[in-house]
Every structure is written in structure tokens, then in C-alpha cells.
Image: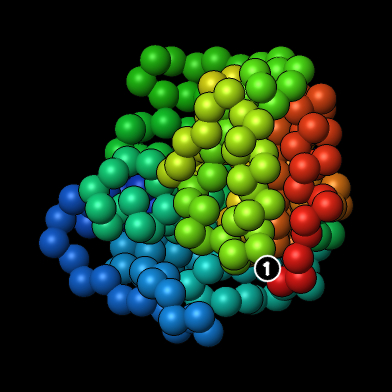
Amino acid sequence: MTAIDFAAFVDQLATVSGETILPFFRAALAVESKKREDGSFDPVTAADRAAESAMRTLIRRMFPEHGIIGEEYGDERAEAEYVWVLDPIDGTKSFISGLPIWGTLIALTRFGEPVFGMMHQPFTGERFAGDGGAAHYRGPGGKRELRVRPCAALDEAVVYTTSPRLMKSADREVFRRVEDAARLSRYGGDCYAYCMLAAGQIDVVIETELKPHDVMALIPIIAGAGGMMTTWDNGPPQAGGRIIAAGDRRVHAAALALLAPGNSNQ
């Protein structure tokens, strides 16, 4: 059984989660902050919890032997051959601000490797999906293949990060090397920025402090579109941490050359 066998089921998960989330968007809702060691604001809402619960229920019903890893409710059978990795709302800060640059991340892993991923933005009606070999978009404008664009050097690149304030101070200083070398640097986007990279609108996305549920769904989308995602030291990205995604290997190498010398311990 290959990842493509699960594509229709991923669509079901996206539909169920979107129907659960949308009534909360741009509505009055209570916002809690998760406990973090540094005391920073890490919001979670009833929409996050309801959407993850709905997806877990559907997965348990259809594939009871599969594992589930989710941002809000932890791990179930994480050692299973097939494991679903869920982030019901990636970009909760944008969500609570009424901005549509958030999405639901759904990944399927096999033996720990992501083999299918989708980012669903239910407010705009967009779905970005990939299996590592190909990636596709569906939205109001129809369907199309996702392809990254060529970018030979940083002085030609559009670089995104969600916010430098999310980085530790040493990492923030290192990121500025890349930012200063880029043609254009912009902030915001969370998972949406990675999908715009896959769509050929952005060249580089650089972030830190990421968790597996932040990246698993995006890895096969970006790879399927012809791009790449690694850690700052050019390692595999599945565990999260410091992450760089790029559409062109040349600009990826150029950015790594600036990031690597300043790496600090997490």
C-alpha cells in the first residue's frame, strides 16, 4: 500500500477539520496560552482542540491500527508502521488575529518517514498536497501542479520567516546574515509560506524551534514540487528544530553557508 492510496482519506480529514474550524474563525473565542519555559505567548483555542479531536475520531474509525501524533492531544501508537501527524491550526496567532495565513497540516508517515502531506486552508478553500514525487494545488482557481522556481543566489531571493522574535537571540543574529543578503525579506505565513515556496512565489523559508507536527506535512509537499527542506546543518528535517526550505539547491547552499558558522545550541 502506497501513500497515494490514502489521498482520498486525507481529503476527508481536511474537510472534517475545516468544517470544525471555520465557525470559530473571526468570531469571539477564548484563547489560552500553553505553558512554555520562557514564558512566551503560545496560544491554543477551542478550534485547535475540536479539529484535532474530529480528525482523531475519523482516523480511529477508518484505520484503528494506525498511530496518531497531534499537537494538542499527544501520541497514540507512535511506534506503528503508519502514523498520522496532525497540526489542526498551524499559525494560531494569525488565526486569532483574523488573518487567513494559517492552515491545517495533515501528514502520513511510514516507519517514521513522511510519505504524504496536505496543508488545507479552509477559509480560502485551498489545498496543497504532495507525496514527495509530485505536488498539487486545488483552490478557487482550479487545479494545478506545484513547482518551485529557479533562484541562483541570495541577492535574487525572497526570504520568509514567521517572525525573528520566535528565534533565540543567537539564531536571530545568524538569520540576519541571510536577511541582509536577500533581495527581499518578509515576515509571517507559518505553513502558508512553505506552500508559497512550493508554488514558486517564495525562494527560502527559515525558522527555528519547530516541532515534528510543524514540518511533517510540508516535507513531501516541498519535495514533490522540486524543492528541499533540511536543518541548518543540512540534516534531515523530520524532527524539526532549525529548518530551512528552499526551491533551488543553489540558494539553499548559499543560505546554509551563512547559517552554519553561527549555529548555537538549542
- Which sits in the foreground, 87 or 185? 185
Q: Quadrant of residue 79?
A: bottom right
Above or below, comparing residue 170 to residue 8 in the picture: below
Residue 164 shown left or right of residue 230 in the figure: left
Residue 77 shown left or right of residue 13 in the figure: right
**Residue at left offset 76%, top offset 65%:** 264
Q: Quadrant of residue 253?
A: top right
Above or below, comparing residue 226 to residue 176 in the picture: above
- Which sits in the foreground, 117 or 169? 169
In the picture, the quarter occupied by the C terminus is bottom right
- Which sits in the foreground, 166 or 30? 166
Q: Position of residue 14 (x, y in %)?
A: 46, 45
Q: Determine whether the residue tagged by mark 1 lies in a helix, strand or loop.
A: strand
Q: Which residue is mark 1?
A: 67
**Residue at left offset 61%, top offset 36%:** 180
Q: Position of residue 90 (x, y in %)?
A: 46, 54
- Which sits in the foreground, 257 or 187? 257
Residue 33 shows in this picture: yes
Q: Position of residue 168 (x, y in %)?
A: 60, 66
Above or below, comparing residue 90 to residue 30 in the picture: above
